Image: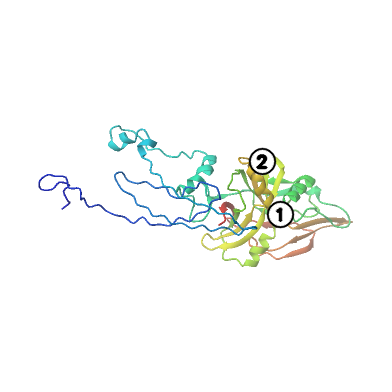
């Protein structure tokens, strides 16, 4: 039977037993010198007491020059009543008015979500969950815009000696745009693989395909695009099963990543591969790109600008044609990789015939942004 707050003589009994709960926990976070940083935000029920005994330690990253002056770190706690934050709070709690809705953050745009709900944002420090699908990152896995880079067949050379396509293999953004400009390169949205017609039939109406062009367009950059940001390319298809690291490395060697400012491809930055692996849980090959130092320095003065993130996959690594008398033939290079594990290497391989590398069944290219710890 519960204790009565009045004794037998109806005098008030002030010795009312209450429940106690241990709220001990740790909060590991990063911040900057000279910054006010929220470290604790929680709802305290009305008419309750709260006792706190904070302990904290600071650990600094290695620096070129050591910090020698004295520094102070201070923690302050504030208790603020809900009724002061919301004028309808009393009516809501007392059920005096129907139809009242609790205040909430309206993430009705990507910009608001990034500003308040991304890793490292104010919402993150206040306790909003920013980790998605159990990975330390921000943004869900989403498919990339996928096309095949091609050019008209008459752009191939016709000299008695092999005339090679310049800029192959494409290794950066400059080479990608230089190739497209020189040879009239366009993207074909119907992706069934990469094919090259016979050397004799390549013409203005018979196209040569070179590789996959992958893009995540319209990314609004913010202050989370720093040296810790990673752009992750994820590859999957139906029969992908525990590939060897050598096949993954061969695939990585055929990639070129770069970020391009929307509507101004003269402002572009090359991405750098940092690691690659096969994720057995998701059955995907993952390739991680970091942002170059030039891009990291560019970001603070250009918050809110829109960039497209591209990855080009060189299926055909070199290609040339010769026309000598009645002989017309190709010479090309291809290396087997994680997408084409059953194909044979073709290094400076000569053939008059056309050839193709069909897409594996269920081939998908997706991406995710991560904040690298």
Residue at the extreme front of the image, as rendered? 70
With 340 as the anchor, is 346 left or right in this view?
Answer: right
Local crowd at mark 1 within 10 Å, few (<14), some, or many (≥20)? many
Q: Nearer the viewer, residue 362 or 38?
A: 38
Residue at the extreme left of the image, as rendered? 9
In the rendered image, is residue 207 in sight?
Answer: no
- Disc sitting over residue 195 in the figure: 1
Task: State how far apart marks 2 and 1 are (Cα).
Answer: 30 Å
Residue ID at (51%, 52%): 72
Q: Nearer the viewer, residue 358 or 25?
A: 25
Q: Secondary structure at mark 2?
A: loop
Please, is residue 107 above or below residue 15 in the view?
above
Residue ID at (40%, 44%): 78
Residue 356: give x, y in percent of width and height.
70, 57
Residue ID at (51%, 61%): 281
Residue 110: give x, y in percent of width and height.
54, 41
Q: Secondary structure at mark 1?
A: strand
The residue tagged 2 is 262
> Which of label 2 and label 1 is nearer to you?
2
Residue 197: give x, y in percent of width and height.
75, 53
Disc on the earlier residue, 2 or 1: 1
Please, is residue 278 above or below residue 113 in the view?
below
């Amino acid at each position: 039977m519960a204790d009565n707050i009045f004794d037998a003589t109806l005098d008030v009994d002030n010795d009312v037993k209450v429940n106690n709960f241990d709220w001990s926990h740790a909060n590991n976070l990063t911040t900057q010198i000279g910054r006010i940083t929220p470290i604790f935000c929680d709802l305290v029920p009305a008419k309750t007491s709260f006792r706190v005994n904070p302990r904290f330690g600071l650990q600094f990253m290695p620096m070129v020059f050591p910090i020698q002056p004295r520094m102070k770190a201070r923690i302050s706690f504030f208790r603020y009543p809900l009724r002061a934050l919301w004028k309808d709070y009393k009516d809501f709690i007392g059920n005096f008015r129907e139809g009242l809705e609790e205040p909430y953050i309206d993430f009705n745009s990507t910009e608001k979500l990034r500003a308040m709900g991304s890793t490292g944002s104010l919402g993150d420090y206040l306790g909003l969950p920013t980790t998605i699908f159990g990975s330390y990152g921000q943004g869900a896995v989403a498919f990339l815009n996928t096309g095949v880079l091609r050019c008209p067949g008459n752009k191939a050379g016709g000299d008695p000696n092999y005339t090679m396509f310049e800029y192959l293999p494409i290794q950066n953004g400059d080479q990608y745009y230089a190739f497209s400009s020189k040879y009239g390169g366009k993207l074909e949205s119907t992706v069934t693989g990469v094919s090259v017609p016979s050397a004799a039939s390549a013409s203005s109406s018979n196209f040569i395909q070179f590789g996959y062009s992958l893009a995540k367009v319209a990314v609004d950059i913010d202050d989370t695009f720093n040296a810790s940001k990673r752009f992750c390319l994820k590859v999957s298809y139906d029969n992908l099963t525990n590939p060897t690291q050598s096949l993954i490395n061969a695939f990585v060697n055929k990639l070129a990543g770069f970020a391009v400012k929307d509507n101004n491809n003269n402002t572009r930055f090359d991405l750098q591969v940092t690691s690659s692996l096969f994720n057995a849980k998701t059955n995907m090959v993952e390739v991680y790109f970091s942002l170059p130092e030039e891009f990291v320095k560019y970001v603070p003065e250009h918050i809110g600008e829109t960039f497209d993130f591209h990855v080009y996959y060189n299926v055909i690594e070199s290609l040339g044609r010769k026309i000598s008398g009645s002989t017309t033939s190709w010479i090309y290079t291809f290396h087997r990789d994680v997408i084409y594990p059953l194909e044979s290497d073709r290094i400076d391989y000569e053939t008059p015939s056309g050839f193709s590398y069909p897409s594996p069944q269920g081939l998908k290219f997706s991406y995710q942004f991560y904040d690298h710890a």
